[in-house]
Structure formats: structure tokens, C-alpha cells
Amino acid sequence: MKETAKFSSEEKLVIINAIDRQFKKHSCIGLVEYDPLAVQDALIETGEFDEYEMDVRKQFKILEELATDHLGIEIDFLKNTFDPETNYVGDALNNGIVLTEDSDEREQEAHIIRVVLGSVYFRTSIAGIKNTKAHYSKKYTLKLEFDDDYVNYSIACPLDGEVYHSYLHDGRTPQKIIKYVMGRKVGERITKKQLNQQIYPEDYKKGRWVIPKDRSIKHHFFARDKELRLFFKMSTNEITYLGDTVENLTQAEMEYICKNFKKCSKKD
């Protein structure tokens, strides 16, 4: 889910906004060569360069991830060839740089970028920019409900208006843990020892831990219910209820969550 993303929505929006500026600079027409040094200059001015540690290499990595999203910006990466005799480095579109004795520091830096990272081109539209920005900036709220009578929890997905249910098996440990923890205060840390004491008091008095010491709450009992980690902070030996709503999720995060939840859930 969220933890699988290499870069945050905020980091992606920094690059999307940079693409938008260069797109408009070229009158919103045709194939545009991405200028990483111009982006770097703009980010230094706004303070985002330091805030997001947005060097040129990171720009390229984020562009690679954006290229796989297929939202509204077509991004292509071209390798550059280097001729050591002429000091020319260029791509298949015949765009390049020749280093001379008169080349300034900026030209040298641009030359190195082409040699090491290559060059990037993008093609988009006004609608494409808007759609891509909305994908990473619009915020959603996810809601969790637990129904002890039907022994399931449900998550409402605002993207498609559906509610997805997951069955926990009546009387088994995951159901009992969820029921007990959701009855406690939000933010209260509950240890495995407390769970054994409160959920299985007779067994605990006899020295038996029904929730074993050597089995992780996070990776054993809720291995198949990873979406619950949005609402519970889980570790090997503790669990904390974070509340029944998760706010400020982006469309990208929502699509990933709902997609994976559908795979393991039954739709009403």
C-alpha cells in the first residue's frame, strides 16, 4: 500500500509542476525536452530543493516512476552517445552538447548529465497536466467499520462508491483482537501480554498464551489483512488502534488500496 511507493505524492507534484512550467514555456506544443538544470534552479529559489533533497538524479528517478503511471504525461528517456574526439554528447533526436575550452560551468554540468543519465522528453496537454495533478493532489478519506455480528470488517472506497468486506472467522484470534482493540481508546498501545490477559483470561491464568510469544501480530495474525495497517499500528508484540478513518489520501494511494483490497475481499 502506501509504503510501497518509492516517492511521495508531494515529491511527484514537485516534478509535475516543473513539467507544467516547461510545457507552458514551449507554448504547450509538441515534444519538449526536459531541462533538469532549469528545474534545479527553480527549486533552489522556492526552497523545495532542500526540502525534498531534489538533486538531478532524484529528478530522473521520479520521472521514471511518473512514466509508468500513464496518466496524462508521456515521458521518454533517450540514451546519449559520447564522442571523445569531439567532446560531443547527444541523443537520437540530434540534440546535444559539445564541450570546448570556452564552455562554462553550466555547460559542463549539462554535459555530464547527458553522459551519465541521458536526456528526457515529454509530451502532454493542458488536460493531461490537470489530470496528473489531480491524481496526486486530490484528497480522499477511507472509512473502516467492524461488524461483530457478521464477523467482518468493511472499507468504503470513495473512488467507486463500493463497500468491500473481509471475513475474519467467528471466534478466531484476529476477530477477537480487532473487537477488543477497537473497544479501547484511540492511540492506546496494547501489548501481546494484555491481549492474552483480556481475551483469553483462563488460559493466561494457567500459563498458556493463546497468542504465542513467537508469533507476530503484524506478520502472522494479520498477514492477509494488510489494509488494516492503515487503521492499526501493528508490530510483533503490540497493536494500537489509530481510529476508523484515514484522511488526506491521494487518488494514487486510493487506487492502489482499493485495487489490492478487491483482490482479497468480497463485494456486496
Image (cartoon, helix red, strand yellow):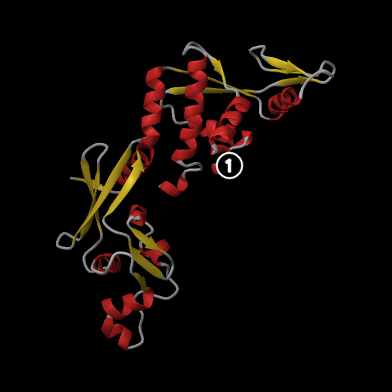
Give the x, y percent position of residue 226: 37, 54
Q: What residue type is labelled 1?
A: Asp
Mark 1 closeness class: few <14, some 14–19, many ≥20 residues within 10 Å: few
Q: Which of the two residues, 147 or 265, is positioned nearer the viewer here?
A: 147
- Within the image, what quadrant is residue 41 found in? top right
| Quadrant where the image shows the C terminus | top left
Give the x, y percent position of residue 19: 50, 24
Kindly identify the residue that appears in the image at 57 percent across and 22 percent down.
34
Give the x, y percent position of residue 123: 49, 17
Query: In the shown orientation, is residue 85 left or right of residue 256?
Result: right
Number of callouts: 1
Residue at the limit of the structure toward the front, as seen here: 45
Query: In the shown orientation, is residue 18 left or right of residue 141?
Result: right
Q: What element carries label 1?
A: helix
Kindly identify the residue that appears in the image at 47 percent across and 28 percent down.
17
Residue at the limit of the structure toward the left, as seen here: 149
Give the x, y percent position of residue 193: 37, 78
Residue at the limit of the structure toward the bottom, as seen here: 206
Kindly identify the residue that appears in the image at 49 percent across and 33 percent down.
14
Q: Which of the two residues, 116 or 175, is positioned nearer the viewer here?
A: 116
- Within the image, what quadrant is residue 216 found in? bottom left
- As displayed, is residue 95 above or below residue 167? above
Kindly identify the residue that appears in the image at 50 percent across and 41 percent down.
7
The residue that disc 1 covers is: 50
